[in-house]
Image (spheres, rainbow, N blue to C red):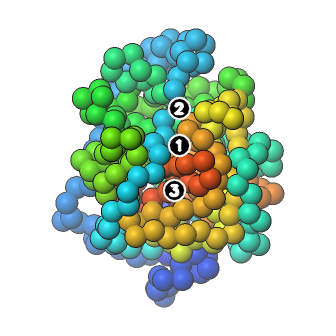
Amino acid sequence: MRHLRTALAVLAAITALGACTTALPGTPKAGPSTRNVEEELAGTQASDLRKVFTSTPQQVNDYWSAERMRSAQPRQPQPGQMTDVPKDEPVGVIIHPTSGPVGPTKPLPRDDSGDVWTRAGLTATTMGRLYMSYAGGYNGLCSASVVNSDSGVIVATAAHCVWDYSGKRNGSWADNVLFIPGDTAGQAPYGRWTAEALYAPVEFQQKAKLNASGGAVGEGWSYDIAYLRMRPLGGKNIEDALGGQGQAFDAASESIRSLGYPSAPPFDGTQMRSCASPTWTANRDNTFTIPCKMTPGSSGGPWYTRFDDVKGVGYLVSTNSTGGSTKMNGSLLGKIAYDIYKKADAGS
């Protein structure tokens, strides 16, 4: 089966990813997770916000003229004061890439340069640039990636890419959300895909703030993840056309490969770029840190673990969130992230 969309296997499938997770007996199979995560989530407080877009694909494409795309501003706040946050409850769920499970990989050598990513593989079609507009005529840009799902229409990015965390536009949602996978110097080799709905944690919406100097503060930044449902293009769902990367919720990560389209100097946003780290630093606020010099614009770009550099495939464990000149922070994907992912996948 090409997509393995419903193979939500427990971490027994790739044991090194889940050193803190207990593998359950039995053979993973297509269908619900071998662990009854849905039952565990039942009755919990809703942890997502949802917006359905009313603009048609044609209206979104008409909005994004070449001039608006050139003038769009990268979104990414600087790190601020960390906040102690209760650890998100684990779910221990793995979703394999559409190309199949990824076996053990060698530790990636450190590379914090943000150099152009040329060994694309599956990342060539699944990773791209994200454009969005806000009230008041503000146009922004981030990065995003296609992830494997039952629906075949899910793209992952950062919550701060689709919600006005600055407070300057009355806490508004993004609109005119356009995803261009493989964007190179403004070209769209795999099409221009428009979003029909977005899902983000209410924790981020309520508690992600900026301090007076523009730094990220508040525990909401511990849940900086969002999922988009994409409309079909040319009669195909995005995953059928382009493939999808895996995801690992609440997994103990190995090496990290981070991708994005940094657009603030010294970068210009015209090419996909990368950082890699054989290790990462866990913070007390449910985030973790890697050395990386990518600048704003890379926000929402994927963090992959167990990444195969040759095939360009791995498991999403976070997205680029806040960053400085030498490091990048990402929030750990746990129960809250899994909850909104399942709602986005179901379209509920």
Do residues under tags 1 and 3 come within 8 Å of each other at their CB atoms? no
Q: Which mark is residue 299?
A: 1
- From what the image shows, is residue 219 above or below residue 141? below
Task: Tell me if mark 3 has few (under 14), some (14-19) or many (20+) residues whose alpha carbon lies within 10 angstroms of its own.
Answer: many
Q: Residue 207 in the image: x percent, y percent?
A: 26, 50
Q: Earlier in the sequence, mark 2 or mark 1?
A: 2
The CA span between labels 1 and 3 is: 10 Å
The residue to which callout 3 is attached is 329
Query: What amino acid is found at the position of numbered circle 2 in the picture?
Result: Pro
Query: Could you say which is closer to the camera, residue 178 or residue 112?
Result: 112
Res. 45 image quadrant: bottom left
- In the displayed structure image, the side of residue 215 where residue 205 appears, left or right: left
Task: Tell me if mark 1 has few (under 14), some (14-19) or many (20+) residues whose alpha carbon lies within 10 angstroms of its own.
Answer: many
Q: Residue 333 in the image: x percent, y percent?
A: 44, 62
Query: What amino acid is found at the position of numbered circle 1 in the picture?
Result: Ser
Q: Residue 92 in the image: x percent, y percent?
A: 45, 74
- From what the image shows, is residue 243 above or below residue 261? below
Q: Residue at point 77% right, 65% down?
A: 109
Query: Could you say which is closer to the camera, residue 159 or residue 167?
Result: 167
Q: Earlier in the sequence, mark 1 or mark 3?
A: 1
Query: Could you say which is closer to the camera, residue 98 or residue 2?
Result: 98
- In the displayed structure image, the side of residue 98 where residue 22 appears, left or right: left
**Is residue 281 among the parts visible in the rendering?**
yes
The residue to which callout 2 is attached is 74
